[in-house]
Amino acid sequence: MSASSATPILVVGEIIVDFTVARPGAECKLRLGGIVHAARGLWACGISYSVAAVCPRYIVDQAQRFLAAHGCNEFVWLGEVKGSPNVIVIGDATEVSDQGYEDLLREEKSVEFQEVGDALNSFSEVLIFPGKFHLSKITKFLSATARVSFDIAYDTEDFSSIECFAGRVGAVAISTSSPLFARVGAVDIDPMIEVATALGAEVFLLKENRGGSRLFDLRTHEVESVPAILSATANSVGVGDVYSAVMVGFRERGWKEAAWRGARAATSYAVTTYPDDFREDVRRELALSLEEMQDLGGTMLPWHARPSFHIYLAAPDFSYVDKPEVDRAVEALQYHNFTVRRPIKENGELPRGSSPSVLRAMFAKDTALLEECSVIFAVPLERDPGTLVEMGIAMASKKTVITFDPRRENNNTMVAGGSAAYSDDLDICINGLFIEISKLWMASR
């Protein structure tokens, strides 16, 4: 199944060079990014598209050749980026925690629009990825009757920049990793829904990373929950772009089915950085009907539901311990909007040589805190006895334990067998946490 017969899409936005730095177990990766991620998704799905690109002069020829080889009908160089190479350095491509984007020479960056005449005027379906350019200047290049959708990531201060398109907006998509979401929607999504409704948008898509996504139909007020299919993440960069592009590409099947197909394409994009492998995987996904995709299930854990499930950190979280792996785990849990309970931070750190009565009092406080929590996330560095005891108490009381064992010091039957997820890979442990808390959330509804 493809959308080759659908109205061609014009994708507008920046082309960026993505550079992922090497990390243990992961190689350096250099590839064209920005709207090229969306283009790969459309190509893999057989969706007809063209590109209006904003990029530096040195990228144009290479980008044009690459896109032509990946299904692009027409390439229009819409704007020249000056003062910056348009290179983003990516610290964590798996999005276990904040990805650490560094946009080189960002403060020196400016965009100078080209004279493209009426080259974009024939397109009736447009998807814009806002960037370091004024959206109001795009309107003069597009047909007044074109339906325009937006994927808002990192270069939109507020929704006022979209107001010039009010009344002809198709979809507005945003990710929980977007700074705009952090400012406006992280606590309550209603303000974002209200603004999208005022723009006359048909649907609003909230992409909630490993917790799935929600599609708000602003005409019928229905909400469609689309679960995530979790597996080891090869590279999460551009996954959301693929989701939005493929969803818009399948819009003629209805926004509901389009969202499901966008989500499945995004899942395929996350597990490989090789386009041909991605396309082969997507083609298998496209063969499924909507009902078959829904029957496969997945993980659903909305952003705003996560804080209510408290996570007990079982780890040697002491001030005198060298514990970068613990700190990284805490950063990851907080990034995904979980409430992390750190007994050593909450109940205090006892000095060595404390009396038995003081130790018993602290034991009682820590075990009481453990009982309050839904899940235990354990990082048992150096076979810390306190951590292992906390894990044992939790397992005995039938609480879910996720064990991140970065130094592979505790790979034994009782630890690995008693944990709902056990790995030295934090990505796998975070996936396991989402799966387990998703079950708790579903049971509580």
Image (cartoon, rainbow, N blue to C red):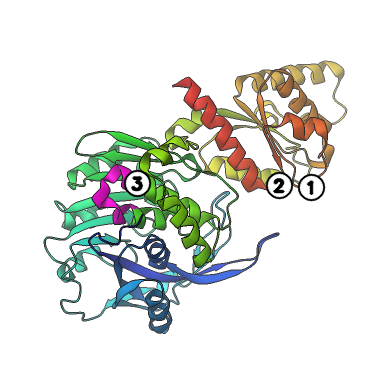
**Is residue 212 found left or right of 421 in the rendered image?**
left
- Amino acid type at circle 1 is Arg
Q: Nearer the viewer, residue 348 or 15?
A: 15
Residue 263's tag is: none
* Magenta span: 247-259
**Residue highlighted by disc 2:** 325
Which residue position is annotated with label 3? 259
Q: Residue at x 44, y 73 (%)?
A: 86
Mark 2 element type: helix
Q: Position of residue 443 (x, y in %)?
A: 50, 22
Judge whether residue 183 can be spotted in this image: no
Q: Residue at x 81, y 21 (%)?
A: 359
Question: Is label 1 in contact with label 2 (beta carbons under 8 Å)?
Answer: yes
Q: CA distance from mark 1 to mark 2?
A: 9 Å
Q: CA distance from mark 3 to mark 2?
A: 36 Å
The kind of secondary structure element at disc 1 is: loop
Q: Which residue is mark 1?
A: 407
Whichever of callouts 3 and 2 sits on the residue coming sooner in the sequence is: 3
**Callout 2, which amino acid?**
Glu
Q: Is residue 330 visible?
A: yes
In the displayed structure image, the side of residue 85 where residue 402 appears, left or right: right
Tell me residue 67's x, y (percent). Answer: 39, 74
On the rendered structure, is 231 left or right of 267?
right
Q: Would residue 250 be counted in the magenta stretch?
A: yes
Q: Assess whether mark 1 and mark 3 are in contact (beta carbons under 8 angstroms).
A: no
Quarter of the picture containing the C terminus is top left
Q: Residues within 10 Å of mark 3 (few under 14, many from 20)?
A: many
Q: In the picture, residue 430 is in which quadrant?
A: top right
Instruction: Out of 256 and 323, give the one closest to the viewer.
Output: 256
| First along the sequence among labels 1 and 2 | 2
**Viewer-nearest of discs 3 and 2:** 3
Residue type at numbered disc 3: Ala
